[in-house]
Amino acid sequence: MSDYELRINRHREFILSPEQDFLLGVRVNDRSPNRYPYEECFESPSKALELALEFLEPSLDLDTDFVPSLYPIQFRMVHPIPALFGCPMTLVADDARVLPIIKNIEQVWDMDVPSLDNKVLHKVFEHLEYYKKNAPPGLPIAPPSEQSPFIIAYQLRGDDIFLDLYDHPAEVKRLLELITDTFVHVEREYKLILNERNEYRASFQYMFVPGLRIAADSNVMLAPGFIEEFEMPCLERIAREFGSLAVHYCGSNSTPGHQFADILSRHSFVKIVQTQLEPYLDDRNIHRRDHSFKLSSIWEIPDLPGFLEKFGASIRETKGVLFLVQVGTREEAEALVRQWPRLRDRLIDPAK
């Protein structure tokens, strides 16, 4: 069994076990600028793979719970599902953007599940096929970050989608149904290309998921009733098809997303939630002790020992955390790896 599979097994046990535990994944990122522009990586799988391997290499042999993965295109997100519906995708600096196309929400009644014959999606397929043939043996490969159905609806419709929830709920549900159907078709194609079984994904953001990892940032702007009525049925259908979900959302002091976390905890198919931990652990999140999922951090923790000292009591109230930490040098990474057994022991038993 490869070292990557051992790490994946640790993630699986952590996520699916009812026991509290704490894992650490460390990534080295010296923040050097990429040698190739984003557009070149989009057009050239070989350049994208070269940069991805260059980025991963310093972290691969660290003795941590970092699960590496290669995903198109380069290190950022592309938007194949909005592109399937006709949204133009533009490359801006080192990111990809889409422009809304639904000017009138009643258009959804004339829409159907789109064909998968699309340049952007075919480019993703091309990258995945190239990585399969040319990546180092055993190194996990994943599609780009999956966006939730409501995020995709927002990309297709723009800001008006928030008013549509009040004024045109039937049309929003029709749009979400079309998006979820398309999402399922695209994911089935990804799994065929990768020869990937269900309930298995070494995902974007370098963690194993017993299903899919789905970004659902827009839900932090919704009232709980809207999340439950419009988004959760879509996520439940995706989970029935592909396995339990890891759900990502970005939390901040102004939009911490506590109401979204509360909803997620009521659904057993949500096994892990990835977010900024400091807003999540804030005392205003009064229900966090009842949240049934495990947690994963984003790369926002600059000083893990100091963070654990500050939030240790709140962290121990959770079901467990996968800490993903980014450092600038190999030396910093190795020092943190040496500290981790003691830090983990103190989380489990603060008397130590």
Image: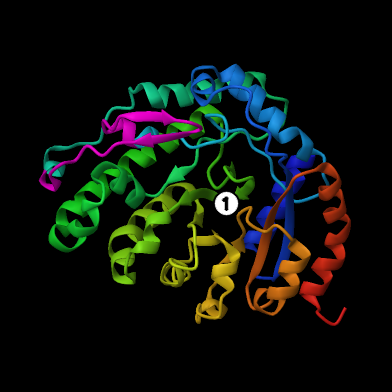
Magenta-span inclusion, residue 83: yes
Residue range highlighted in magenta: 82-106
* In-image side of 238 versus 211 (left or right): left
Q: How many marks?
A: 1
Going by the numbered disc 1, the residue's amino acid type is Pro
Residue 182 quadrant: top left
Q: Residue at x 37, y 21 (%)?
A: 119
Residue sitting nearer the eye, 313 or 144: 313
How many neighbours does mark 1 have within 10 angstroms: few (below 14), some (14-19), or many (20 or more)? many
- Judging from the image, the colouring scheme is rainbow
- The answer to whether 123 appears left or right of 134 in the picture is left
- In this view, the residue in front, 294 or 236, is 294
Quarter of the image for residue 102 reads top left
Task: Please identify the quadrant where the C terminus is shown.
Answer: bottom right
The residue beneath circle 1 is 210
Describe the element under mark 1 as helix, strand or loop: loop
Where's the N terminus, which quadrant?
A: top right
85 relative to 341, above or below = above
Query: Where is residue 198 shown, x and y percent of the image?
Result: 53, 43
Residue 128 visible (yes or no): yes
Q: Position of residue 338 (x, y in %)?
A: 89, 56
Residue 88 percent location from the top left of the image: 30, 29
Question: Can you give x and y, in whole percent of width and height, for residue 97 in the image?
Answer: 38, 36
- Seen in the picture, residue 332 relative to 43 is either above or below; the reply is below
Q: Residue at x 43, y 66 (%)?
A: 255
Tell me, yes or no, whether the highlighted magenta stretch contains residue 92.
Answer: yes
Q: Residue at x 18, y 56 (%)?
A: 164
Q: Is residue 1 visible?
A: no
Please tell me whether residue 85 is drawn above or below residue 44 in the rendered image.
below
